[in-house]
Image (spheres, rainbow, N blue to C red):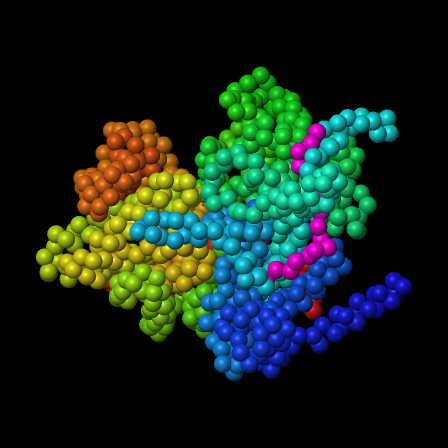
Amino acid sequence: ELGGRKAKVEKMFGLMDEFLKNDTISLQKDILDHVEFTVARSRFSFDDFEAYQALAHSVRDRLIERWHDTHQYFKKKDPKRIYFLSLEFLMGRSLTNSVTNLGIQDQYADALTQLGFDYEVLAEQEGDAALGNGGLARFAACQMDSLATLDYPAWGYGLRYQYGLFRQIIVDGFQHEQPDFWLNFGNPWEIERVHVSYPVKFYGTVEEEVLNGKKCKIWIPGESVEAVAYDNPIPGYGTRNAINLRLWAAKPSDQYDMESYTTGDYINAIVNRQKAETISNVLYPDDRSYQGKELRLKQQYFFVSASLQDIMRRFKDLHRSFDEFPEKVALQINDTHPSISIAEVMRVLVDEEHLDWSKAWDIACRIFSVTIHAVQPEGLEKIPVDLLGSVLPRHLEIIYEINYRLVEELKKSFGQDYDKLSRMSIIEEGAVKSIRMANLSLACCHTVNGVSRVHLETLKTRVFKDYYELWPQKFQCKTNGVTQRRWIVVSNPSLCSIISKWLGTEAWIRNVDLISGLREYAKDPDLHTEWKNMKRVNKMRLAEYIETLTSVKVSLDAMFNVQIKRIHEYKRQLLNMLGIIHRYDCIKNMDESDKRRVVPRVCIIGGKAAPGYEVAKKIIKLCHAVADKVNNDPDVGDLLKVVFIPDYNVSVAELVIPGSDLSQHLSTAGHEASGTGCMKFLMNGCLLLATADGSAVEIAEEIGAENMFLFGAKVDEVPALREKGTTLKGSLQFARVVRMVRDGYFGFKDYFKSLCDTVEDGGDFYLLGYDFASYLEAQAAADRTFVDQEKWTQMSILSTAGSGKFSSDRTIEEYAQQSWGIEPCKCPF
Ligand code: GPV
């Protein structure tokens, strides 16, 4: 029997190439089949969206083929696997990325042209998968691409939200949020796995039981919800490997409410059952603020519990004893959001597998590593004890036990230093007694990763100082990266061709270090010509997009100056706005001959404000108010345009970044853990105007500080500057522009008052006033350079050439070697 099955498997592998051909005719046939049988339209009449759906399904088939092969192979080899747990993944669109990674872009483009369709137009039909907020979530997506491309045996686990990040619409310059019901028209990129489902329990009580003469605890849960798997294949580039991103959706379970069915309240019983689905309904749209909400905790535990059941089932299929668990399993927790998994692993090992506590703890400590993305101690997640005790009573007990043992151990090192012990404790005493999820992670994880060198320093010296002194070896720097597949190959095909042509190879797409080979040609006039043409075409595309969305016409000769990211006070979009106002004010006071020396600028801003974040929303309104005034002022003309791009998301970024000349990264030093947007701009040859914060410090090392525009207070100057507080005076220029806003020069005087207050009157926590002069100087330097197009182009080439370090491939290699201890497992077919 076994021999028979083996022969069958061999036969299947042998037939592999027989399936799904990629020549033009086969692709056309597949697309038309999907038009008829999947989309159920007649092949004689279907529109662009239906064509996109059919196209997507034909790509999906090819993904599934590789994905099956990869998992069959992983199963055969049984390597140590990395499981990447994240509450957020910002995948964006899948079509072009998948086709590119499968390596059949030209074939598809031909096939579609012959059918009378345009590949690019169809690609535009796809909506974004926006199951995340910002950098943290997009970074998770980039890491998945690198894990697949580098052939690592990896799984991603997350939540399948029905509603992704809200859509931003702008009405009279104000942000409004609309639900993103992204699944309305179906999602061809996921595979519903009705048979892969697990019960997830909540509430209830903990009871004591005697088992084999030993006392043990058992959890009698009060509610059960079913987690159903939805699989999203992630193809690698230049490999047959395709890994899996498994997202869980909540469905009602038929356990536990049988009672109501028999008592006759049939309708209510069904309505109540349906409430289970709310767990995976909606993504929390607040970047980095923790409010101790029950639903949020349930989301975290729901996806963690389902994922761990899945991981343990897979492990038990092949292994008998949990002794081998750490040799086969690495669990990465993305920020503290999934850290309840530590308590869950302990619960399963101790309560269900009946391991000794110390044995179980030893296993837990060998499998977990965590990456922290926060900078501020106040930004760390805390869960009120009462809440945790009600939703997960057994987990609360387990956390108390972990903490008890932790504190006993800490006493050995620190004696009776109670201040220290209480800082390091997992339990925070106080008005609201809470669980510090970061401390739970620190106590257990073998590795605690920072996302840039500056960030790791902050973790060591400020945020987790006590823990660093105790366990310095746990702390590691893994500077973030982004995938050049999406951020160059897919979103900037002309740049991609230029790089391949000048390097004489496409190998940089998998081995991005080669990109430094461009340095040699940084002064080559032929390369300059190609480079400038590429930029011009990308700017043209962006200009069209801007005009369609905002009706503002922009000049392609202007410098496109861009700031796109979530709106936050620390990211200082307000500094950008005040700089724009200053520029406007200068132009207004110029005579015609002065004006001729002004470098024309298009200032592009995009980003979402968390729905409850008032200051951020006022900044968005200020952008619009300033834009209204400036764009309609005949004194200004093309010298200055201000554009707010609504509903910023991944696919908007793919369009905007390649068309930018200058990008701005203005966080007050010490506040941006890393920043990853800057890396995408860097790869695309956009110059950076930035503070020496997060990864910008490392970018300056790679490309040379002279090739970017750095400004502002340094990380180690900030605390002292803050101390000085009220005595710190911003420049006269700063006072003047803030006054313009206060006086209602842009209207909405009362509305903007509190916004102005945040940077004046002794406030100005983020030091806008202090940094203003140096910001203007950096902007002036950018102007001077832009006039010298040769110099600018050279800096632009050197930016791309120096971007190699900032590939997520490098980041993932570091994680694989330093944190996870995993090896590639490349599907040979
Ligand atoms: I904490 N980040 C985020 O997007 N959301 C969060 O809740 C938190 C951090 C970001 C950081 O702000 C960026 O500096 C960083 O580049 C990114 O996470 C990825 O590490």
Q: Is residue 529 above or below residue 264?
A: below
Residue drawn 57% across the image and 55% down it: 144
Residue 569, located in which quarter of the rendered image?
top left
Residue 284 included in the magenta stretch of the image: no
Point out residue 727 in the picture as x, y percentages from the top left corner.
25, 29
Horizontal side of 243 relative to 695 (left or right) equals right
Residue 204 included in the magenta stretch of the image: yes
- Image: magenta residue range: 189-205
Asked whether residue 27 is in view, the answer is no
| Quadrant placement of the C terminus | bottom right
Q: Which residue is at the far top?
A: 416
Point out residue 813 in the picture as x, y percentages from the top left corner.
58, 53
Residue drawn 47% across the image and 45% down it: 285
Horizontal side of 16 relative to 535 (left or right) equals right
Name the foreground residue: 573 vs 808. Answer: 573
Point out residue 385 in the picture as x, y percentages from the top left corner.
59, 27
Point out residue 56 in the picture as x, y percentages from the top left corner.
57, 68
Residue drawn 48% across the image and 67% down it: 125
Q: Main secondary structure of the magenta part?
A: strand
| Quadrant placement of the N terminus | bottom right
